Amino acid sequence: MLLRTKIIMSTVAAILVVSASIFYAWHLSRSDSDKEFETATLSGRMALWNKVVKAQADLMKSKTTSLKRNRPLMKAVIESDVDTLSREAVYDYNRLSSSKILDNMVIVNLKGKVLYNANDSKNNNTYISLSNRIFKSKKSIRGVSLVGEKPYITMAFPLYSRGKLVAAAIYSKGFKAALKDFKDNSAMEPFIVSKDNKVSFSLDEKTSENILFNIPDKLTNSGYQVLNHEGAYLAIASVDIMDLNNKAVANLVSTQDVTASFKAAQKIDWITYAAVIFLIILSIVAIFFFLSRSFAPLNANIETIERLTDGDTNIDIPIPTKDEIGKLSRAMVVFKKKLIEMQAAEKNKLIEAEKNQKEIKQKMLAISDRLETEMKNAVATLLEHSGKAFTLTSEMNESNHKLRNEANAATSTTETATQNVESVAAASEELSCAIQDITQQVSHATSVSKSGVEASTITSRKVERLSSA
C-alpha cells in the first residue's frame, strides 16, 4: 500500500472519528437542552396551574364572609336545625354558584355530621375528613381534594359563633374554570386525566378523548413528549396534581400544536446533517487533491532515485519547495554529484588497471622469451653432451669386443700360458665390469637427457601459454 493511500485513509478515519465525536457531543448537548427545555416546560406549566388553582381558591375564600355573617344559618348550625340551615345555605350557594365561584357547598358540625351538602351527598366521608382537619388546626385550608373519583379545588374554613368554633364549611369547584384560565394564559388545550387514565375535566371532551385514545402511552405520569397525531405534531405535557396530603390524585395534560416549529427543527436538523456530511466529503476531496499535489514532487523524486540507482546521471533534479521534499531534492543533487565522482574514479581505476595489466603482460612475455631461449640453449648443450656420451659408449663397446676376441684367440693358441691367460681373463673380466658400469652410466645419462628434453618441451608449452595469455 502506498504511503499516500495510508495517509489519506488515516486522515479520512480521523475526520470520521472527529465527525462522529462532534455528532455525539451535539446529540448529548441537544439531549441535555431538550431535557432542560422539558424540565422548564413542566415547571412552567406546573407553576401556571398552581397559580390558576390558587386564584380559584382565593376567589372562593373571598366569598366566605357572607356565610360567616349569616346569623340565622349559624344559629341553625348550633341547634343542628337542618331545615333552617338548608334554607339559609341554599341562598348563599345559589348566589355563589350562579356567579360560577363554586360547584358545591358542605357544612359539617363538630360532631362530624354533614348538616348540608348542596349536590354531592355520596362523598360525605371526604368532607368529614376535611372538617376534622379544620377542627384540629382551626385554620383554613385550600388546595385540591379527590372527591369520589374526581379532583376538585377545595376551600375549607372554620365557622365561629361568638368566638366559638361551631362547624366547618367546605367550598369545592371543578376544574372547568381553572382549565379555561389555564388555556387563556398559555394558549394550550388542557384536560384533567385521572389515575385510571380517564378524562375527568375538559373544555373539549371530544378532542381530549380522541387524543387520549390515540396516544399509546398513558398520561398518568409527569412528562413531556412530542407525538404525531393525525398528521399534526402535538407537544404533550403532563404534570401531577397534588392533593392536600401531597399525593398525586390526577394529571393536568396540556397539548399544543407544534407542527410548524417541529418541522422547522427537523429541517434545521437535516440541513445540519447535510452540511456536516458535505463538509466531510469536501474535506476528504480537498485532502485527496492536496496530498496528490504534495506527493507529485515526491513521485518525481522516487523516479529520479530509481534512475540514479541504475547509474543514470543524465537527469535534472528540480527543487520545487523549501519543505522536506525540497530537502530531499537537495540531498539527491548531492548524491548525483557524488555518484558522478564515483563513476569518474571507477573509470580511472579501470584505465589504470588495464595499463598495469598490459605492463605485466609485456614483462611476462619478456621473461617467457628469455626463459625459452635459456631452455633451448640448455637442451642443445644437453643433447651435445648426450651425443658425445653415446659415441664414447660405442667406442668402448667396440674395444671390449676386440679384447674379448683377442682373449679367446690367445686362449685357443696357447695352452701353456694358462696362468697368464687366466690373469688376462681376470683382467678382461674386470675390464668387462668396467665397461658394463660405463654402459649403465651412459644409459642413465641417456634417460636424464630424455627427461631434460621432455622438461624443456613442457616448459616451452607453458611459456607459449603465458605468451598467448
Image (cartoon, grey):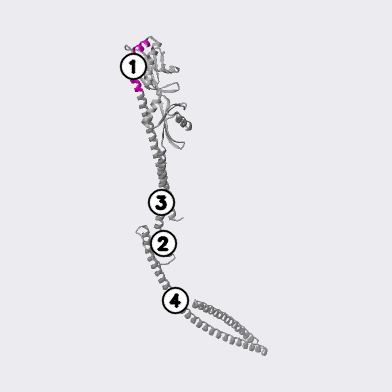
Closer to the camera in the image, 142 or 175: 175
Could you say whether the residue bearing mark 1 is in a helix, strand or loop?
helix
Residue type at mark 3: give it: Leu
**Which dot, 1 or 2, sits closer to the camera?**
1
Residue indicated by mark 4: 358
Q: Is residue 380 left or right of residue 155?
A: right
Specify the label residue 221 is tagged with.
Answer: none
As drawn, the label of residue 66 is: 1
**N-term mark: 3 or 1:** 1
The answer to whether one can see residue 109 in this image is no
Q: Residue at x 39, y 37 (%)?
A: 34
From the image, give the main secondary structure of the stretch colored magenta.
helix
- Between the C-alphas of marks 1 and 2, the distance is 105 Å
Q: CA distance from mark 1 to mark 4?
A: 147 Å
Check disc 1 and give the amino acid type: Ser
Q: Quadrant of residue 345?
A: bottom left
